[in-house]
Structure formats: structure tokens, C-alpha cells
Image: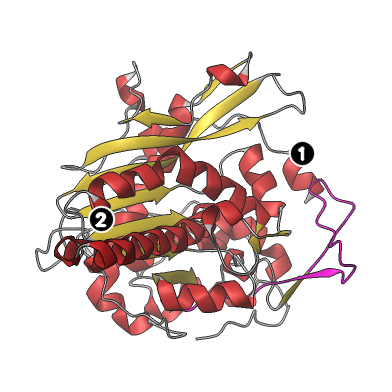
Amino acid sequence: MEDALQGLSASPVCSADRQIPAAAVSLNGTALPFPLSDQRPLPANLLHLAPQEGASMHWHYRSLQNFGHWSSCVSKNGSGSRSTRTSVTRGYPKSSNASEAWLKPAGWKSVSTLWLQSSNSKAADAAWFDTPFAAVLVKDSILTVLVRGSKTLTDWLADFDYRHSSSSSLGLPGKVHAGFAGIAEQLWAGGVRAALEKYVLAGNVSTVQISGHSLGAGVAALLAYTAQAYIDQKASSSSSSSSSSSSSQAAAKVDALLFAPPNVGNSEFVRAFNTRVNARKVQFAYDVVPSVPCSPSMAACPDTSVPTNNPNGSGIWQYTSIGGSMMITPASMPYQAGSWARFGKVHPCKMQHFITATHVCSYTCFLSRFVAEPHNSCLLLDKVVAGGEGTYCAGSIATFPDTQSPPYPYKA
């Protein structure tokens, strides 16, 4: 971990030129995205729903990628008092450079952009930079919150802070990942709660969709629980005082679309989450990120850049995986399934060489099956190798030889 953190820059690099428009309709012409079927309480596996819901998931994943590529382009950096900084922008910040514009989903109103406030120094008012971490959008009866993944040193420090937190401000049961909870608290107070009050409780929104990738998926899971609990509590209070105004509120449902989500909490939290949140946990079989922090227990480490020692002296932190899993296997890839299967011969400790393929391209490739998407990132091998159409993934398995280690196991 120390080497990884030392190699990170405090400020992310703009990659707006990598944005690709999200498909607006499914293969059968259904407008995207659409509400997911209510599967609460969540069973362990929901892969059978991929043919029905995959197109909506593709819209979210592509929109998350675009937001992440653009967010670095408008990062604010400088120095001075934190009192001059902001955690929310109405709409979204515009760049004077057209090549750095956000490819916002067509037809959607930008409600707000939520910033992650950070500092690259321990000094309270030293040099700092802030970067957009989430976008709140609305269209018709759907409110969407997009939560990006790790891009900065501050993000990575949050990733590694897997101590438990009770996060009372979010009203979460059990114990949850402290780093994710800290970001979720900023986003909730910064604009998510206000958007729910305006568009759900006092508006006509009946579906809230909160999506995230990687770190963003961990944060999105916590936000989804808090959002659904908040809506339920307000609907219950309204029902008690006036039954005539409760119907739309009672119908409001939160869908959590979580791509490569890390584990976010202990068994008590997960039991409550599976009951309350209509989630989909989308993960590629050979992506190691959804396996951390390790379940059922993660070692507590006191002497690292982010100390995670447990005050109770147990030496571990307990984590449990949420339900609603949609496990992507190599066989389910539309092209070069055999090439994707080669990751099974790579030891998990060597997977960092292939993180682009396993942690990013795998999701684009699988979900491209459900929309007309030529930019699918499915192809891993040299162009002379037959067996695929579309675009190539930068994290090619062909770059590295197979190892002699045992296959990396996954649960179908």
C-alpha cells in the first residue's frame, strides 16, 4: 500500500476526451434508464435479471465513466481559508475549454454537483484541491445520483480507511467502513438530502437511482440506505398526519446500482441493507476490488499510511458482503470469452497488472450486450486474433504471460 500511495498525484488529470455518449435506448427501444424490479429483501444472487435490466445498468455505468473523466477537468486548487470553499454547485461547473466539457446525459437536468473537499497537507489552510465527486440529475419521475470512483490521493486514503464507524449522521445500523462513511456524510449534507426533499417528498419523483463504481459504489451503498430510510421515515410521518398526501412518497423506491463495490459494513449493517435497499451488486469474477475489505474479517494494521488498528484489541475488522450479486464470468462476455478466462490463471497478488481490464473494461464489455454499443472494450488480444468486434481494452492480458499459480477461485 505504501508504494501505491507514494505514486499517486494529489491532483487528478483531465480525461474528458475519453467520454462516450451513453446509449439512450435499449435494444428493444426502451428509454434508458428505467426503474429496476423490486427484489427486496435481497437474495444472494440476481444474475438472472441481467437480460431485463442490463441496458439500464449500461446507461449508469457509461454515465459514471463520463462523469469521472470530466470531474478532473474542473478540479479547484489553490490555497487559503477553507471558508471560501464550496461543497455544492447548482447545476454543474462549465469549463471555458470546449474540449473539457461534460458529456451530460441527454435530456437530463443537472440539479447539483457535489464536491469532495480535501487537502494535500495536514495544515488546516494549506494548499488544497477540491474535485466533483457526485452529480445529481433528474428527468421525469427518476432522480439519479452518480458517484465516481477513486481518482485522487484523498480518494485512496479513504479507500484504505477500513476502520469501523457508526456514522450516526447517516442513521446507519451496525458498523460501516469509515472512509466511505466520511465521504457519504459530505454528499448527504451537501445536496443529496436536499434533492430528495425537493424532487421526491415535494415533487413527482417515484424512483431514486444511486449508482457508483469502485470507491463510488461503496459510498453509493451507504447513501442508498440513508436515502431509502429517510424517504420511508418521511412517508410514514406523512401517512400518520394526512393519508391523502402519502401515496407518492410511499411509492418512492431507491435503486442502488453498484459496480465493483467493496464490502461496506459488518453483518448487522448488511442484514438491514438487504431488507431496505433494492440493490444490484455487479462484479466481475476476477476483479479483486469487490473482495475487499476481506470477508468475514480484515486484518487491523496499525503501522501503515492509514492506521486501521482496532481499539478493542481483536486485530481484525468484521465485514460481510451485501446481497443482490450479479457475478460476471468470462463465459458471459459477448466476445473473446476464452481470453477473459485467462485471468483465472493469474494469481490475485499479480492482478494489479490487469486492473484496467478486470476492474473497468469487464463491466463495459458485459453490459454492451444489452445496447447498441460499438465501444465495448471487449477485446484483449492482438488484432490478428479472431473472435471479437468492437474496441480494445488497454489492460490486455496479452501483455503478461500466464502464471503457474492455481486458478483464482470465484463463486458463480
Residue 374: which numbered mark, if any?
2
- Label located before the other in sequence (2 or 1): 1
Identity, as a three-letter code, of the amino acid under mark 1: Gln
Would residue 55 be visible to someone looking at this image?
no
Snapshot quadrant of residue 392: bottom left
Snapshot quadrant of residue 343: bottom right
Q: Position of residue 143 (x, y in %)?
A: 26, 51
User: What type of secondary structure mainly makes up the magenta span?
Assistant: loop
Snapshot quadrant of residue 386: bottom left
User: Badge 1: how crowded within 10 Å, few (<14), some, or many (20+)?
Assistant: few
Above or below, 391 against 112 in this view is below
Q: For numbered disc 2, what is the local secondary structure? A: loop
Q: CA distance from mark 2 to mark 1?
A: 37 Å
Q: Position of residue 360 (x, y in %)?
A: 48, 57
Residue at 56%, 67% in the rendered image? 287
Relative to residue 40, is residue 358 drawn left or right? Answer: right
Q: Give the camera-side residue of 361 and 149.
A: 149
Examine the structure image and report whether residue 350 is included in the region drawn in magenta. no
Q: Position of residue 185 (x, y in %)?
A: 54, 47
Q: Nearer the viewer, mark 2 or mark 1?
A: 1
User: Badge 2: how crowded within 10 Å, few (<14), some, or many (20+)?
Assistant: few
Relative to residue 132, is residue 409 drawn left or right? Answer: right
Total residue callouts: 2
Relative to residue 113, is residue 323 drawn left or right? Answer: right
Q: Which residues are magenta?
A: 299-326
Residue at 31%, 76% in the rendered image? 50
Residue at the disc numbered 1: 6
Examine the structure image and report whether residue 308 is included in the region drawn in magenta. yes
Identity, as a three-letter code, of the amino acid under mark 2: Pro
